[in-house]
Image (cartoon, rainbow, N blue to C red):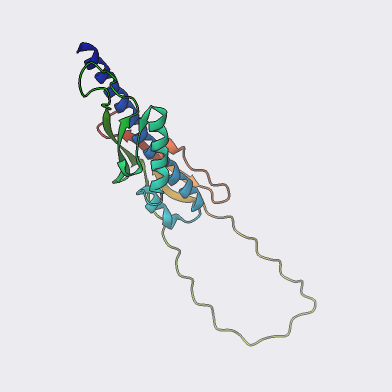
Amino acid sequence: MYVVVGQAAALRSGAQTAADAAALGAAEDARDQLRDGWLDVIGDPAQWSGLLQGDGYVIERACQRAIALASLNKAELKSQDCVPQDLGFTVTVQTERTVGNSIVPDTSERRATATASAVVEPLCTFEPPEPPESPSPPPSPEPPTEPDPSATPSEEPEEEDPVPISGLSCGGEDWEINPDDPVLPPVEDLFRVRLTGDDE
């Protein structure tokens, strides 16, 4: 009996490890998708706020990552057992191994199950820039005049460099994004991934 109890406890511990890894994997994949999506719209600040709120990741892809990590930890995770939550996932896994004791009845085929939840927490805030002022209406056209043949043609106006995008603050640090060479903070500074109930 002591052996069976020990085997069951070890199996349960393995199941919880697999569930934790799967939940974290799904949340981390969602986080990485959000950052990739952010880079795609880096020049359009109007779309930044949605990404900071967790809009724009593919749930199925994140769950596939969870399934793969569960398998690496000798557990099975079915797609229907990877459930999206509010910017996070809850998963339920079942161990591939059984208690495997033929002496104690009803234990030889018994598997361990475990559930875990992980969330993605945005660490940044963004204040969209003020919209540009409406241009003044053009003056009334003057009657055409004959060009002065002796006048030199005017030079083309120089293009102004794009203004850096400001208003992004991550962990109390302000960032400016150069539209010509956009660089985002590291993904760990944009979003935090943690297990639900993990206070660290």
Could you say which is closer to the camera, residue 62 or residue 74?
74
Q: Is residue 171 visible?
A: no
Residue extending farthest to the bottom is 143
Which residue lies at the image location 53% right of the left edge and 78% below the top edge?
A: 138
Q: Is residue 125 above or below residue 47?
A: above
Which residue lies at the image location 59% right of the left edge and 58% below the top edge?
A: 160
Q: Is residue 43 visible?
A: yes
Q: Is residue 28 above or below residue 157?
A: above
Estimate the x, y position of residue 128 in percent, counting from the top left.
40, 55
Estimate the x, y position of residue 93 in percent, counting from the top left.
31, 33
Q: How many marks?
A: 0
Left or right side of 100 for 188: right
Q: Is residue 48 above or below residue 191?
A: below
Q: Is residue 33 above or below residue 144?
A: above
Q: Quadrant of residue 47?
A: bottom left
Q: Quadrant of residue 131?
A: bottom left
Q: Quadrant of residue 68?
A: top left
Could you say which is closer to the camera, residue 150 or residue 186?
186
Estimate the x, y position of residue 156 in percent, counting from the top left.
69, 66
Could you say which is closer to the camera, residue 30 or residue 11?
11
Could you say which is closer to the camera, residue 41 or residue 7?
7
Which part of the image, by quadrant, shows the C terminus? Answer: top left
Which part of the image, by quadrant, shows the N terminus? Answer: top left
Left or right side of 99 for 181: right
Estimate the x, y position of residue 110 in percent, counting from the top left.
26, 26
Which residue lies at the image location 27% right of the left edge and 27% below the top edge?
A: 112
